[in-house]
Image: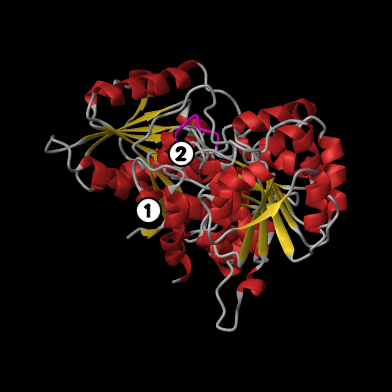
Amino acid sequence: MTEWTNWRRTRELLTPTEMARADAAAIAAGMPGRDLMERAGAAVADEAAQLALPLSRATPRVAVLCGPGNNGGDGYVAARLLAARGLAVRVFGLGDRARLAGDAAWAASEWRGPVSSLRDYAPESFDLVVDALFGAGLSRDLDGEARDIVLRVNAWRRASRGKVVAVDVPSGLDGAAGQARGVAIEADSSVTFFRLKPGHVLSPGRQLCGDLRLAQIGIGPEVLAQVGPATFLNGPALWGSALPRLRMDGHKYSRGHALVVSGPASHTGAARLSACAAARIRAGLVTVAGSAGALAEHAAHLTAIMLAPCADGADLASILADGRKNAVVIGPGLGLGATALALVAAALTPAAGRGLVLDADALTLVANDVDALRTRIQAFGGPVVLTPHEGEFARFSKYLSREVESDSQPLDSKLSRARKLASATGAIVLLKGPDTVVAAPDGRASIATELPRDLATAGSGDVLAGMIGGLLAQGMPAFEAASAAVWLHGRAGDIAGRGLTADDLPGALAQALLTVDG
């Protein structure tokens, strides 16, 4: 019986290269490669049977499309086991079966039925397809016969009640980048092994995979130490132990003091959202600094948040001379003029131990000179978090494009782009989206998935920035703070529900926090 894992509770995401190393380590430790393939194929067969049996036909017809590598080998095992269960199975092979090698050749030899040419595959003759053509390590765009088959399978799936089960990843999907290599199978379910890959959770890979199924096939978790993964699924398993907890002997001063820098009058809502979020995520004290006109607007709305007069960069520097203000959020609603630029410069004044979140307008103000930003961050002395969405990230592209030209990675994925900016600036980079990536200068990265679509609303990012600032104020390490904020932001969105506005999110944070620390 297949051992399944709830993939949402795992931490590590393995690139195709790292997964190959995990396989090799398990084999070196005494697990035969054939056993790994047998267990992988069994997991695929279990999932295929679950999808096939409810279909209308008494004996479901299954087409297993096998490629020329180990992915195809898993398909041959699945075909044999599905036939043994009484399903009507037909195997179609890509390329010359005689050229299969190693465990894939063994698996093919164990299949006693005929193997038809892929050219003979007619989708309409089947109820379910097992896609075992290409695995996660595909390094080129699909063309020719393979491309044609992918397009035919997708057209059939859309036009019928048929189902597709992908082995490891849908054929054509890059397992490291989460992008299609020209075209890719659109699967109803994808069965992968030991650990997920980045391509399973990065868009559009997450959508192409359908339901994710994670099977354990005999690779022990001890091999992770040998593999040394640096990419992680964002969730409490990654950062839960670092999340600040309320202590019996704690008080407001022990939970830090977050400062949010406001924009001018009539542009104050974004800063208020950030400040409320910082307080809701349990920073001990929160202050909003702004001009006299801005503070009049804030005073009409805020009670638990303190206010501080701040007309310019000199005022902000004076406020920050108080080292107890140990986290700053600047950018939401800030503006782009000379005063705003001076405020950002003051926020970047060296201050050992203080955390800084640069969001929204602050990102626009610093994006034109990444080298200068890196110098400022190096001198700053504390953690800095950049929180761009794709449009804001594009403002850094003039610098990053030079890096892309010399990069050997075939696809410039969201993950690699976030890592490049983190490396270039020395900051934690949070690149927003349905697959939000948090990247650290040391190469660590987290990927969030299944974030609620309703978060794509005005002010949502301001709340997120405030959450990060609140966690930094409490002393949470910056990579973990940014990752935790992303996850909790998504959880708050789930709690607030459909039709949420950004105002709903801070109030939902209390319940979101209950899901991780009781």
Residue at figure coordinates x 62%, y 34% from the top left: 413
What mark, if any, has residue 206 been given in the picture?
2
As drawn, 273 above or below 286: above
Q: Quadrant of the N terminus?
A: bottom left
Does residue 387 appear in this view? yes
Q: Dot 1: few (<14), some (14–19), or many (≥20) neighbours within 10 Å? A: some
* Residue 297 x, y percent position in the rendering: 57, 45
Residue at figure coordinates x 45%, y 26% from the top left: 94
* Residue 403 x, y percent position in the rendering: 78, 31
Left or right: 395, with 68 as reference point: right
* Residue 475 x, y percent position in the rendering: 68, 66
Q: Is residue 437 magenta?
A: no
Residue type for callout 1: Ile
Direction bottom: furthest residue: 249
What is the spatial separation of the Cα atoms under label 2 and label 1, in whole angstroms? 22 Å
Residue at figure coordinates x 22%, y 29% from the top left: 161
Q: How is the image coloured?
A: secondary structure
As drawn, 378 above or below 517: above
What mark, if any, has residue 244 been given in the picture?
none
Residue type for callout 2: Arg
Left or right: 92, with 256 as reference point: left
Q: Mark 2 or mark 1: which is in front? A: 1
Q: Which residues are magenta?
A: 169-174
Q: Quadrant of the C terminus?
A: bottom left
* Residue 263 x, y percent position in the rendering: 65, 40
Secondary structure of the residue carrying numbered label 1: helix
User: Between disc 2 and disc 1, whose residue precedes?
Assistant: 2
Asked if marks 2 and 1 touch (Cβ < 8 Å), the reply is no
Q: Which residue is mark 1?
A: 495
As drawn, 392 above or below 84: above
Q: Which residue is nearer to you in this view: 150 or 178?
A: 178
Q: Dot 2: few (<14), some (14–19), or many (≥20) neighbours within 10 Å? A: many
